[in-house]
Image: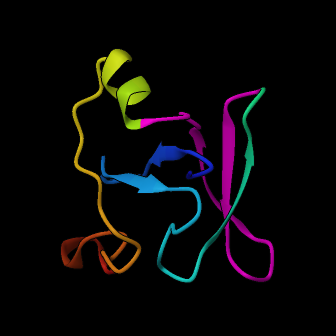
């Protein structure tokens, strides 16, 4: 069972356990909060944490689940 999901800055759904990009996640399921940080602790993104993909759908969010290997950002944005 996964620890949860969040929506990244490009509108993709990612797993808290495998955010990709070399990032780490700290999730608080009670507060429904996830902090995405670099390995040195720099905060790069904050998001709502969802327990399941069904919870994301219930919230009215239509997004694609991507694996950790999927890059963050777009080439057009300098990533």
Quarter of the rendering containing residue 28:
top right
Residue 10 in the image: above or below residue 37: above
Asked whether, in this view, residue 52 is left or right of residue 61, the answer is right
Quarter of the image where the C terminus is located: bottom left
User: Does the magenta-highlighted stretch encompass residue 34?
Assistant: yes
- Who's the residue at 73% across and 82% down the image? 39
Magenta segment boundaries in residue numbering: 31-52
- Residue 29 at what x, y percent from top left? 72, 34
- Residue 41 at what x, y percent from top left? 80, 73
- Who's the residue at 30% across and 46% down the image? 11
Asked whether, in this view, residue 47 is left or right of residue 78, the answer is right
Residue 55 in the image: above or below residue 16: above
The mark tally for this picture is 0
Quarter of the rendering containing residue 23:
bottom right
Q: Looking at this rendering, what residue extends furthest in the front direction?
A: 1
Asked whether, in this view, residue 75 is left or right of residue 17, the answer is left
- Residue 24 at what x, y percent from top left? 66, 70
User: Does the magenta-highlighted stretch encompass residue 24?
Assistant: no
Quarter of the rendering containing residue 33:
top right
Color scheme of the displayed model: rainbow
Asked whether, in this view, residue 16 is left or right of residue 25, the answer is left
- Who's the residue at 56% across and 45% down the image? 4
């Amino acid at each position: 069972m996964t620890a949860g999901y969040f929506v990244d800055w490009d509108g993709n759904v990612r797993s808290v356990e495998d955010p990709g990009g070399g990032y780490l996640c700290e999730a608080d399921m009670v507060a429904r909060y996830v902090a995405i940080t670099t390995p040195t602790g720099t905060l790069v993104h904050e998001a709502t944490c969802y327990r399941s993909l069904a919870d994301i759908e219930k919230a009215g969010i239509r997004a694609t689940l991507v694996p950790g290997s999927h890059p963050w950002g777009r080439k057009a944005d300098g990533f």
